[in-house]
Image (cartoon, helix red, strand yellow):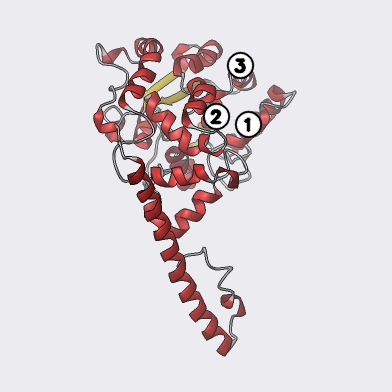
Amino acid sequence: MGKRLVLHIGGSKCGSSAIQNYLAKNHTQMMQNGVFSPDQELDTKGPYKSQQIFYFQNLKTQDNAQGILEQKFRQICRFMDRHEQQTLIVSAENLSLIPTLPEILKRAAGDLFESIQVIFYIRRQDDYLISAWQQWGLKTYPDIGTYIEQVGLMMSNWNELLGAWERAFGQSRLIVRPFRRDLLKDGDVVADFLDVLKLPHDGCQPLGGLANRSFDESLADMAHRVSDVFDGPHDNRFYEVMIRTIGEASFKSKVGSHLMTLTERQDILAGFHEGNEAIKHRYLPELGDMPLFNPPTERDVASPNDHERLAAENALLSRAVFQLAQRIEALEKDQLTDSKNRQDPTKGNWLANLFNPR
């Protein structure tokens, strides 16, 4: 049988982490089903995180990107032959944002695979922009409006981003899926990915949890106030510390966002209306008169006043202080015990263990 290449190109904030985590968790079982996902360096050495985001981020600056990729694909194909693999999945949500790579990928892989499929998940733009602001924008931009104007509108122009992939591979090889629970298989992006691509997954285990969850907006507001602690848009140490400190309270639990008004959301959707309709016409004609995305409603908007927003931030800070105080007390008790028996002096270093909850 000829080999198949699946290019999962995103988009960002559209369930990519869930898909990648599922592939990584079930890597061995998926290989038994003939499906291989390479490691983070587009290699066969492991460990298998089943995503190549930073590999492609670095590759775009290389002078001989096509030659490098062709060598990688040949190496992987030899590995697939030895292990009787039929399908290769390359997954990197930033691929959709690098317009030079589709043609390079086509030339590097075209002679090695009998079939190539490109799958692209897309999200309603106002929701995407809010999520992207929390993930990346607040770390380097003064406000969400500036971020949207300078970066966000380009990153969420799905119709424009599809252009380079259509030119390289042709529309027939592209699959576009709205990141909408009512349209996804079983309301789940992983189930949808497996179903649409007809990927065998016998014996695989479900994720058992959400991936790359949205943060509580009060926590994001706090992160923006101290944005100088971030080394760049991909530095997540602040969030990681807060997750370890306050746990579930770090994540969004309420419907609605205070980052955009309903009018602002509607204006954003209006700006993308023509492009979204063009995508629907090309890839989802079965929707008929239905819009590609359900329009925003009042339910999507939260409107706390300044006092309420400050109170929510203070509540998170109070929770963090309380959790840290409890850990200090517990670790000091450990230090007392260890100082008596000296069995494990490293446990007595309560400061080193402060951010490691039990």
Which amino acid type corresponds to the residue marked 2 in the rendered image?
Asn
Q: Residue at x 36, y 13 (%)?
A: 273
The residue lying toward the viewer, choosing from 30 and 171, is 171
Residue 240 in percent (x, y) is at: 50, 52
Secondary structure found at label 2? helix
Read off the residue under disc 2.
94
Read off the residue under disc 3.
103
Residue 269 in percent (x, y) is at: 36, 18
Outermost residue, bottom side: 340
Q: How many marks?
A: 3
Q: Earlier in the sequence, mark 1 or mark 3?
A: 1
Q: Residue at x 52, y 36 (%)?
A: 136
Residue 146 has which mark? none
Residue 347 figure quarter: bottom right
Q: Earlier in the sequence, mark 1 or mark 2?
A: 1
Which amino acid type corresponds to the residue marked 1 in the rendered image?
Gln
Which amino acid type corresponds to the residue marked 3 in the rendered image?
Glu
Position of the C terminus by quadrant: bottom left
Q: Are marks 2 and 3 in contact (CB under 8 Å)?
A: no
